[in-house]
Amino acid sequence: MPDLLKVAKFGGTSMADLDAMKRCARIVTSDPDKKVIVVSATSGTTNLLSSLFDHVETDQKMEIVDKIRKKHLEICTGLVHSTEVEKAILQVMDSLVALVQNQHMMTPRIQDEILSHGELLSSAIFTGLLKEYDTGEVDTRWLDARKIITTDRSHTKAQPDISAIAGNAEDQLIPHLESVRFVTQGFIGSSPDGTTTTLGRGGSDYSAALFAEAIHADVLEIWTDVTAVYTTDPRVVPAARPITEISFDEAAELSVFGAKVLHPATMVPAVRKNIKVYVGSSMKPQKPGTWIMKDTRSKPVIRAISLRRNQTLVTVKSPDMLHRHGFLAKLFDVLSRHQVSVDLVTTSEVSVSLTVDTDIQSTERDSLNEDVLSELRTFSQVDVEKDLSLVALIGNNLHATSGLSGPVFGLLEDVNVRLICHGASSHNLCFLVSQTSAEKVVQVLHNRFIK
Ligand SMILES: Nc1ncnc2c1ncn2[C@@H]1O[C@H](COP(=O)(O)OP(=O)(O)O)[C@@H](O)[C@H]1O
Ligand SMILES: N[C@@H](CC(=O)OP(=O)(O)O)C(=O)O
């Protein structure tokens, strides 16, 4: 067994084309401890696949399929032994064509089946490429992630079955780690009856964390297109700074509150098994990245600022709430039956405000649909405000730090702050603002509070 056992995940931007894949191959082959390699679909492919769900004609769908085929075959032309990989690509593409031509009802099950093709394509190419770099000491093997990542049947946002995954890894991975390097897919899994599931968009980080937990890895590496986790999204604030070390708790809050660099669930297996997480750039691997660990030497009050776009604020009012019990139970019963996932909640004597993610990809799939709203309207007045963003200050001891909210909200005098949550967590202070003012708010706060 290697000294340290590592799982390395490469995101879509790291798989973008042959040059990007070659950079990743060098990262993998320069370190024999990396035993499970988890890849995302090449960048843009999952979006192309999901555009097949739109109500477009078969001709248009076939154009999209052709585009995906061409993009992947083009990468293959740069491989030394391209024939075998091309054969694998054409097989995956045939299966996609069959799905697109024969399945007219885009059920969540079919959607997952279609989406899985992105990771099946990229992993086939990356396995072929790695084999070209191997010197013979390691045996690089393609692995179908669905044999390991067992989930429930909630298509498009499946929940992993941790003990089944541990059992699968025990039988199929751990005995081979001495001599084999596995290349597998992020994002996809399989339900107990064998149908393909997905963990939700951006879920490859989560897959990699689940693999790391299942093989008892020491380190999980997330290789992406930024050199580190930054004090805020560098696309929003170019002056954002890379963070050298951050705690599990802070990183979890940062991802939950919108930092796309990590999928929100990634930290859950890492915390459970105390697995150190490293975030680095596959484009500039020599640049220092971020270590995410149980405890850090420094514990600043404000470490980072995150921004989560596309929030909907629902305010439910009823005079019945005053001095009565059971109103909240009734409200949450409706939300729970309709599987509406609520993030923030504030209450007053006669009203409750809560936030949910707006599904920007489809109004049909929006969990906050007319059925939910009309059921809520049978016992209350319901107001819905869209186009909001959640801004969160992430750090340590925020709930017990006096004199914080004055300077924060003092800077936002001209901004309509719609909802504030402070005190529920020691690691965040968050509030809702309009989508149009959100980036400016992050810039102003970063400028003032991040040293
Ligand atoms: N605090 C942050 N630090 C670093 N990157 C962030 C942060 N917040 C948001 N991001 C965004 O996350 C992106 C990387 O995530 P993603 O696009 O999912 O990568 P990948 O394709 O590797 O999975 C970056 O390009 C950056 O814009
Ligand atoms: N390909 C999937 C899963 C994923 O995590 O991708 P990425 O690592 O590129 O964010 C998606 O786009 O949602």
Image: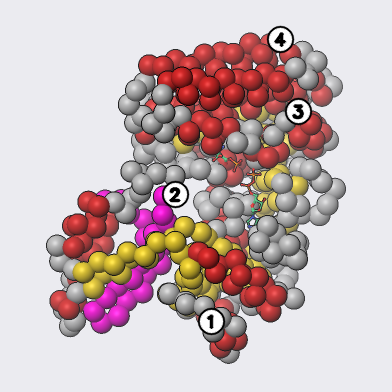
Residue 18 within the magenta-colored segment of the rendering: no
Observer-nearest residue: 350 or 434? 434
Please tell me how crowded label 4 is: few (under 14), some (14-19), or many (20+) other residues with Cα within 10 Å: few
From the image, state whether disc 2 or disc 3 is nearer to you. 2
Element class at badge 3 = helix
Q: Report the magenta residues as a range.
A: 337-359
Please tell me how crowded label 2 is: few (under 14), some (14-19), or many (20+) other residues with Cα within 10 Å: few
Determine contact: label 1, label 2, CB under 8 Å.
no
From the image, state whether disc 4 or disc 2 is nearer to you. 2
Residue 288 location in percent, x, y? Answer: 81, 54
184 shown above or below 300: above
Question: For the residue marked with disc 4, what is the amino acid?
Answer: Thr
Residue 245 shows in this picture: no
Q: Marks 4 and 2, how far apart in space?
A: 40 Å
Sequence-earlier tag: 3 or 4:
3
Residue 39's disc is none
182 shown above or below 304: above
Q: Marks 1 and 2, how far apart in space?
A: 28 Å
Residue 83's disc is 4
Sequence-earlier tag: 4 or 1:
4
Q: Marks 4 and 1, how far apart in space?
A: 62 Å
Identify the residue shown where x is 36% and y is 29%. Answer: 106
* Residue ID for mark 2: 360
* Residue ID for mark 3: 18
Sequence-earlier tag: 4 or 2:
4
Sequence-earlier tag: 2 or 3:
3
Residue 366 location in percent, x, y? Answer: 35, 49
Q: Marks 3 and 4, how far apart in space?
A: 16 Å
